[in-house]
Image: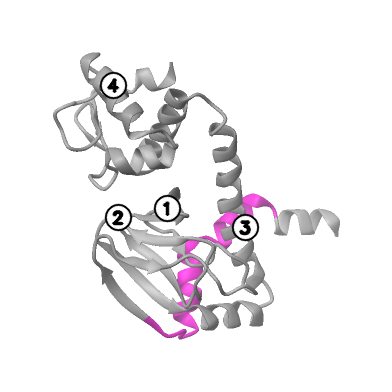
Amino acid sequence: MQEMLVELYSHRVIRQRFNYDNFLDTLLENRVPYTKKMIPKQTILIKEQETDAFVYFIESGIISLERDEQVISFLGNKQIAGLSNTFIIEESLYTFRALERCSVYAFARDAVVELLLSMQEGWIYLYMNHMNHDGFLIEQCVMMREPSEIRLKGCLTELLGKYAVSDGRKKILAKCFTKKVVSNYANVSTKTMTQTWKNWSDEGYIDGAANQFIFYSLDFLKE
């Protein structure tokens, strides 16, 4: 029996059965009311410490999570905004801001929680959402102990892994990841970012004349 339970609720099975697509399909199949929205750039979807009325399933675009004006994390395609706190507490832990134009499914939070609590395995969707977020925060806490340039390299490596597009040999981050946004996220000063940007440009690693992060090489991020 124990082996059956381990297999039933192994991380592999859970990730396959309780992922974003299945979560969204479950809500749609159960006719949970929703609105399909296009969110303009810089729109605040949810404010920290205010009632968290909606859950947003992100179809496209990038959303930042902020706390006390500090960028904590980002959410992109096939991720969920609005379930970062426990389902008992309605106040949002973060401010969710659209960094670029986003396409989302907006569900009433109460209706989502009510459906999940009525399902035998509904709690697993909440568990997966919290596990992914908590694991990320632990990694961030460790990285923030490093010197500023290493923090900056670590943050860029993470963002490139999630949000970069390729153009030949170049790797490009979306324009919404400005120097201001990235320096805030890495918790480095604008002065440090400006100087580091210049150094990387002089060394030929990035396009210093561009208004976004365009990388000619990623090898220096591993040094």
The span from disc 4 to disc 2 (Cα, nearest Å) is 26 Å
User: Where does label 2 land, which residue?
Assistant: 99
**Residue 160 pos. (x, y %):** 36, 36
Mark 1 touching mark 3, by CB under 8 A? no
User: Where does label 3 land, which residue?
Assistant: 14
**Residue 106 pos. (x, y %):** 39, 75
Q: Nearer the viewer, mark 4 or mark 2?
A: 2
Magenta-highlighted residues: 10-34
Q: Nearer the viewer, mark 3 or mark 2?
A: 2
Provide the secondary structure element on which disc 3 rests. Answer: helix
**Viewer-side residue, 217 vs 16:** 217
The span from disc 1 to disc 3 (Cα, nearest Å) is 34 Å
User: Where does label 4 land, which residue?
Assistant: 217
Q: Which of marks 1 and 4 is nearer the N terminus?
A: 1
Mark 1 touching mark 2, by CB under 8 A? no
Provide the secondary structure element on which disc 4 rests. Answer: loop
Magenta span main SS: helix
Q: Which of marks 1 and 2 is in front?
A: 1
User: Where does label 1 land, which residue?
Assistant: 69
- Residue count near mark 4 (Cα–Cα under 10 Å), binned few <14, some 14–19, many ≥20: few
Q: Which quadrant of the structure image shows residue 90?
A: bottom right
Q: Which of marks 3 and 2 is nearer the N terminus?
A: 3
The span from disc 3 to disc 4 (Cα, nearest Å) is 37 Å
Mark 4 touching mark 2, by CB under 8 A? no
Query: Could you tell me the amino acid type at mark 1?
Result: Glu
Is 151 a magenta residue?
Answer: no
Which circle marks residue 205 in the picture? none
